[in-house]
Amino acid sequence: MSDTHECGCGCDHDHEEEMETMFLTLDDDTELECGVLGVFTVEEVPGKEYIALLPLEDETVLLYEYKEVGEEVELDVIEDDAEFDKVSAAFDELFEEE
């Protein structure tokens, strides 16, 4: 009997790609580890990039405006409801297959 895994190749490693993670510091100074689902643009909102994060202990996707400033990454809350709706719709369209 061979020792095979779900992939059926007979290997002993996991074929699933590990998700990149980052930590968010919340208002109460606690940190929340999140998987990075992706950085994306929205056609209706030119000149901005957005990031989709998935807290490792939750299934609620978090959407933020994403900026790289030198070596640092800045995340900004999307405060405009119309902009958030466009970003959310774009996220749904881009990631629904995954």
Image (cartoon, rainbow, N blue to C red):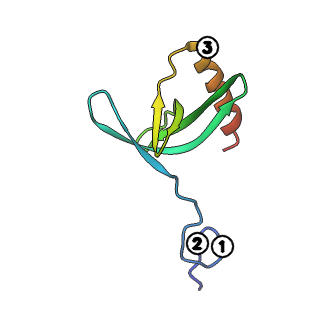
Which residue is pictured at 52% across the width and 58% down the height? 18
Q: Cα distance, mark 2 to mark 1?
A: 6 Å
* Quadrant in which residue 10 is drawn: bottom right
Please state which of residues 14 and 50 is positioned toward the viewer in this rendering: 50
Please state which of residues 26 and 1 is positioned toward the viewer in this rendering: 26
29 with respect to 12 (left or right): left
Query: Mark 2 and 1 residues: CB-CB less than 8 Å, in contact?
Result: yes
Q: Looking at numbered disc 1 in the image, what kind of residue is underneath it?
A: Gly
Q: Is residue 36 above or below residue 25?
A: below
Q: Looking at numbered disc 3 in the image, what kind of residue is underneath it?
A: Ala
Q: Position of residue 17 (x, y in %)?
A: 57, 59
Please state which of residues 25 and 91 is positioned toward the viewer in this rendering: 25
Which residue is pictured at 27% across the width and 33% down the height? 29
Which residue is pictured at 56% across the width and 81% down the height? 3
First of labels 1, 3 by sequence position: 1
Give residue 8's mark: 1
Q: Cα distance, mark 1 to mark 3?
A: 47 Å
Q: Is residue 51 above or below residue 46?
A: below
Q: Cα distance, mark 3 to mark 2?
A: 47 Å
Q: Looking at numbered disc 2 in the image, what kind of residue is underneath it?
A: His
Query: Mark 1 and 3 residues: CB-CB less than 8 Å, in contact?
Result: no
